[in-house]
Amino acid sequence: MLNVSLIFPRRNWRGALQSCRASGGCNLRRLAWFEFRCVLARRKRAVLNRLLLSQDPGSLPMSRRRFLRSTALASAAAAIGFAARAAGAPAIQVLETKVISPDPGNYHGWPTLTRRRNGQLVLVWSGGRERHVCPFGRVEMMTSNNNGQSWTWPRVLIDGAIDDRDAGVVETTQGALLVTTFTSLAYEPKLLAAEKQNPNDKGAWPAERLQAWQAARDRLTAEQRQAELGQWMIRSTDGGVTWSARYPTVVNSPHGPFQLSDGRLLYAGVELWSKQRRVGVCESADDGASWHWLSAIPARPGDDAAAYHELHGAETADGRIIIHIRNHNKPNENETLQTESSDGGKTWAVPHSIGVWGLPSFLTRLRDGRLLMTYSYRRVPGGNQGRLSLDGGRTWLQPLAISADATTWDVGYPSTAELADGTLLTVWYEQRKGSPKAVLRQAHWTIKP
């Protein structure tokens, strides 16, 4: 009988894996490599055992050349099987999906969810709206102390004289809550067009609606409305009981800033309402009380940076920073692009495609170090998807369908929080067929082992 160990000496991959886990000093990439070698070794040995046991006892012993050829095939089969499984998406189970907005008379848009260290969930969004574009938007908040089983009645945090739109929220390491938004006059061209119509024209607005929009507009003069444009933040240091006055930030993005392990906060976004319209990152070193410009994100060759929108970021387990970008340039249009920084956000790689159609992305770093991106998917079947990265954002697995029952294009902006038991809660907005009023929906789901 051929001595297998003489040709392929056994490497103690299992021992290396256990040492790596115990030390806590292994990054995810090295850990994944040891896991790969353990799986590959087990599969190879199983195939070889079948080959050796399948020999007829009366036949000639297997030659070394034949053995090597068979072993190579076994190794390839094991590796291909592992790679196929690694490239695929893990199975998930959606435990519950439900509408959580309590006000069916208003349109709800662009929410963000965060989980505080004490377990409380905080959800903010643009509420009080008539529809996707209107002058009535305001920032609202509600909280849950039972993992989203029930929510408090909404509370208005910001209600300016023009439209307050996408709302973001994060809890800092010092316990402050930061809520972000931006103001817009996108409703003005719509109102101007409506005012030019005669009451009997096709598509003319009802008098009551026209009067309401005019009354909202006329709270300020045209000059005062222009002065209201900006990107804003409010801050609470008592768990959301009281809030500061709004103050400007340098950039805006729907889901707001994210925390770094060194205590700084980064806010990746777009400098709105300025001639420069810079795309990049601003920084806070004082727990979100003030912000300054840190660095620009370069555009890909041939791209127009004006077609980059709605950024969000996260720090990986190995200290790198990943930022996702909503892209509307022709190459990779409607895809999420990614850029990375290895120096704390001072410089950024040229954005590149990660092969994900859908946007905008919200990044969540799970407690086990994996990265989760959740994003809206506006193709049939429309809804919201997620993808996992096991290597700090270097590669992304296949999509996970969190929801796939959307009936209109107006759906998405999901954000996800990991609960204490390791399950996940995702909240998004969605306009359902037959109603002009978008609702807030929530999915409680889990990644199967």
Image: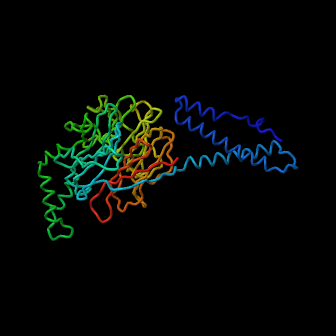
Which quarter of the figure is the N terminus placed in? Answer: top right
- Residue 331: tell me if it is visible: no
Residue 421 lies in quadrant: top left
Q: Position of residue 205 (x, y in %)?
A: 18, 65
Q: Position of residue 188 (x, y in %)?
A: 19, 54
Say whether residue 230 is left or right of residue 65: left
Q: Is residue 12 above or below residue 403?
A: above
Q: Position of residue 20 (x, y in %)?
A: 57, 31
**330 vs 181, nearest the viewer:** 181
- Residue 58: tell me if it is visible: yes
Q: Residue at x 59, y 39 (%)?
A: 35
**81 vs 355, nearest the viewer:** 81
Q: Position of residue 106 (x, y in %)?
A: 23, 57
- Colouring convention used in this rendered image of the protein: rainbow
**376 vs 98, nearest the viewer:** 98
Say whether residue 82 is left or right of residue 224: right
Q: Residue at x 31, y 28 (%)?
A: 285
**447 vs 186, nearest the viewer:** 447
Say whether residue 44 is left or right of residue 152: right
Q: Residue at x 45, y 34 (%)?
A: 320
